[in-house]
Image: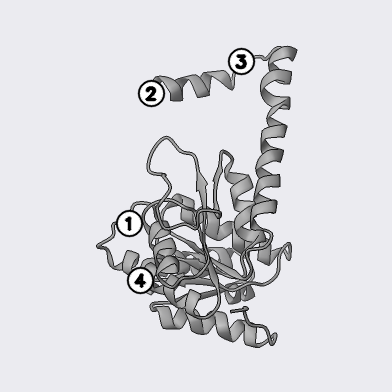
Amino acid sequence: MTPNEDKKIREKFKQKTWNEIKTNDSWAIFKIMAEFVEGFERLGKIGPCVTIFGSARTKPDHKYYKLAENIAFELTQNGYGVVTGGGPGIMEAGNKGAARGKGISVGLNIELPFEQHDNPYIDSDKSLDFDYFFVRKVMFVKYSQGFVVMPGGFGTMDELFEAITLIQTKKIGKFPIVLVGRKYWAGLMDWIKNTLIEEGTISPKDLDLISIVDTEDEVLEVIDTFYKKYSLSPNF
């Protein structure tokens, strides 16, 4: 454990003075508010976009990196912009594909001590930096008309289940959620079916919120089919 990690744990057990609460906790609301305001103002006019989630650790020579780039490219050719977490790996691939397709390329970067840094494929006026994960996640779900979830780790799982929960509870519209990589997601889906559904903690119909595919063509088919039901399509 590093000294900084040790300090964070010990601080949680420290009794704060009133001045410390006012200085550190109460005033943090203004920084949080500023991130919301900037996000709303900058993203409010981006038009129809699809968010691509996925691992920051995926290398450019990996098949999933190349697949994410192709998915983003095809999305732009069908009128959608692309939103990512703004960092390396799958996020970079998504923005790279969007830039190659000359479409909207948005990056919502989170400030972290490792792994995360801006990638160079984001539109200059559509790159935002966040200190707070929860503010960033609001931007993902508020300004996306679909979610493509590439293989990833804990952060990707967090984003995936945030989107599913908001749709399941009808807090946002029933936008398409597409998991890419049947083999990668098979274990998770088996656990959901054999544990969550068997225990009754979710409904079998909740699985209808998720599509699982392997190719960029299947991703586009899921998204286009969904919006055709509503006679909707993105603007070119």
- Alpha carbons under labels 2 and 4: distance apart: 37 Å
Query: Please, what is the three-letter code of the amino acid marked with disc 4?
Result: Leu
Identity, as a three-letter code, of the amino acid under mark 3: Lys
Q: Earlier in the sequence, mark 2 or mark 4?
A: 2
Q: Secondary structure at mark 1?
A: loop
Task: Indicate which disc, 4 or 3, sits on the residue closer to the N terminus.
Answer: 3
The residue mark sitting in front, 2 or 1, is: 1
CB of mark 1 within 8 Å of CB of mark 4? no
Q: Is residue 22 left or right of residue 189?
A: right
- Closer to the eye: label 2 or 4: 4
Q: Position of residue 210 (x, y in %)?
A: 55, 73
Labelled disc at residue 223: none
The x and y percentages for residue 45 are 67, 62
- Circle 4 is placed at which residue position? 67
Q: Quadrant of residue 206?
A: bottom right
Inspect the image, locate mark 1, and give the three-letter code of the amino acid beneath it: Thr
Secondary structure beneath disc 2?
A: loop
Q: Which residue is mark 2?
A: 2
Q: Earlier in the sequence, mark 3 or mark 1?
A: 3
Badge 3 or badge 2: first in the primary sequence: 2
Contact (CB < 8 A) between labels 3 and 2? no
Mark 3 to mark 1: distance in Å?
Answer: 39 Å
Q: Which residue is mark 3?
A: 14
